[in-house]
Amino acid sequence: MHDVVDLRSDTLTLPTPEMREAMARAEVGDDVWEEDPTVKRLEAVAAERLGKAAGLFVASGTMGNLVSVVSHTRAGQEVVLDLDSHIFNYEVAGSAVIGSVQMRPVRTARGFLAPEQVREALRPANIHVPQTGLVCVENTHNRHGGTCCTPEEIAAVAEVAHGAGVPVHLDGARLFNAAVALGRPASEFARHADSVTFCVSKGLGAPVGSVVCGGPEFVARARRVRKMVGGGMRQAGIIAAAGLVALERMVDRLAEDHANARRLAEGLARLPGLRVDLARVQTNIVIVAVERPGGPAAAAAAAGELVAGCAARKVALHAIGPASIRCVTHKDVDAEDIERALEALRELTSRWQDKGAT
């Protein structure tokens, strides 16, 4: 049992005792000089898991995406991606600022580009328009509630992009959640992508870091860009050691987070004024829409009341929109915590039922 049930994000996980011990004992060197043995081991293990030739340890998923986009593209090119993608919405326009590339967001049904959408978004050979430099796919998809796309869907998108000479980057911040949920090796998702990044610091529980994987030439370019943006971390083996434990010990247990998310989603769907699309609850993210009589303003006010009311009951939630709440399960949220969260929300929404639920 935890003092606070923190459902705001899986970035809030705390390192395990095994991780802390590994960090304390880590053999280190200067990673900018490529002399940190623990970092090199993490990069090699990550690359092998994803079926790629090389890996690069970076500080965060955002940094991983940034160095990947910049390494694949040239200034003035365009990146095709989903409208709700993390790269477009939550990475401070880094690709535009550092890489001087333009985003071309496409609205999708589930967060995943369809091959025909990619084909339509690719720019023709015309002096008036930017060249398409990259296609990005996000799996699992954050804003669409942790939904997964299959390796076959990624392959279909890659076939169109590669046919036009355009590389594909996979933002796999929670890629191992997709692998566990669909029962497929992570390498199958990465096979048709030219680069992939995943976080060891979310559901896998490490305190810091992500790994970018791809071919040797791509990783060499990415290493240079990492240095450009201040990502040379010197004796980084101290944190890479936790990442190794994450990959070796924490992948299979992600299924527990998925089961807790499903339990939470089904409980929320039964409460008045709350709507959950259960078909989208595939992994560890639950998106809750708040609906109240009186329109959007009333729904937004009610969502705010829920977040504040839960906080007062030691349940932390995250509002991702005026009337939308995201809940994320992780290793530091157990089945008992899920029941505590549901009880808090039952108590708060029962007041709405008295006034007439939607």
Image: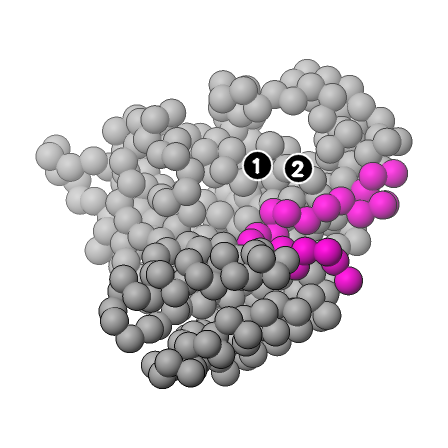
Name the mark on residue 60.
1
- Mark 2: secondary structure: loop
Give neighbour class at mark 2: few <14, some 14-19, many 20+ (Cα, 10 Å): some
Q: Image height check: is 332 above or below 279?
A: above
Query: Magenta part of the protein: which range?
Result: 1-21
Could you tell whether 295 is left or right of 19 in the image?
A: left
Q: Is residue 139 visible?
A: no
Q: Quadrant location of the N terminus?
A: bottom right
Could you tell whether 149 is left or right of 337 in the image?
A: left
Q: Nearer the viewer, residue 167 or 355?
A: 355
Q: Image height check: is 22 above or below 350?
A: above
Which residue is at 21% across, 44% downward? 123
- Amino acid identity at mark 1: Ser
Could you tell whether 106 is left or right of 310 in the image?
A: left
Residue under circle 2?
Answer: 208
- Mark 1: secondary structure: loop
Q: Is residue 25 visible?
A: yes
Name the mark on residue 206.
none
Which residue is at 42% across, 83% downward? 354
- Amino acid identity at mark 2: Val
* Count of numbered circles in the view: 2
Which residue is at 73% across, 56% downward? 3
Could you tell whether 294 is left or right of 194 in the image?
A: left
Q: CA distance from mark 1 to mark 2?
A: 7 Å
